[in-house]
Amino acid sequence: MKPIYLGLIALALLGSGVAVSSVAGFGPIAYISYHIISNQNENITIIPANIDLGNLTPGMKGNVSVNSTITLSKTDNYTIMLLHVEKLRKDFSKFVIEITINNETFNVSLDHPRHVVQLENGTYHVELTIFYKVSLHPKGDLTVNNEPLLIIHPGIYKDHGDHDHGDLGHHGKGNDNQGQDDQGDS
């Protein structure tokens, strides 16, 4: 009879040990991480420009020039758009980017943050010159590091009032000339 009691006690202890270990949560059995590279944007390859305006003071103005390279695999209208317009507007009284691509020069700015350009497939050397003047009373982010400034998307941008990124509508041919005002602010 004693062996039966010992067996029942052992079984009870084993069962409570399993229950305690599952309640205590000994830990996950597996972890997983992955990053799927989508093939949907294969038509644009970009070597971006890195721009560092350095330390700025209120009222300071200047300009900086940099270069970028874009390779396109299809002919289309492309929208080039300035990002974070509202944030930039809080720090700068003037912020204009002069862009030269495919022998065409145009500007994007706080008031005209996008431009549509027709480009053939191929590789393009893009020249960017930023003309800026720091606000006398900047009230936005006073420190910015490695934040996207300009993007290019196939298609023609449809303005929905969101200049931080916005939706790009119509991705086909056709040119509705949105954003093609040339701002001669120098």
Image (cartoon, grey):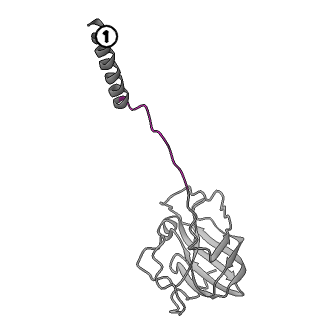
Q: In what quadrant of the picture does the C terminus appear?
A: bottom right
Query: On the picture, is 115 further left or further right than 9?
Result: right
- Dot 1 corresponds to which residue? 6
Using the image as rendered, state which of residue 38 and residue 150 is in the foreground: 38
Q: Please check the rendered image and state whether residue 30 is part of the magenta-colored stretch, yes or no.
A: yes
Tell me which residue sits at (61%, 81%) in the image. Answer: 107
Corner quadrant of residue 104: bottom right
Q: Which residues are magenta?
A: 24-34
Q: Is residue 143 above or below residue 123?
A: above
Query: Residue 172 at what x, y percent from top left?
Result: 52, 88
Using the image as rendered, state which of residue 119 and residue 145 is in the foreground: 119
Q: In terms of secondary structure, what is the magenta stretch mainly?
A: loop
Tell me which residue sits at (62%, 77%) in the image. Answer: 43
Corner quadrant of residue 182: bottom right
Tell me which residue sits at (66%, 61%) in the image. Answer: 52
Query: Residue 18 at what x, y percent from top left?
Result: 36, 26
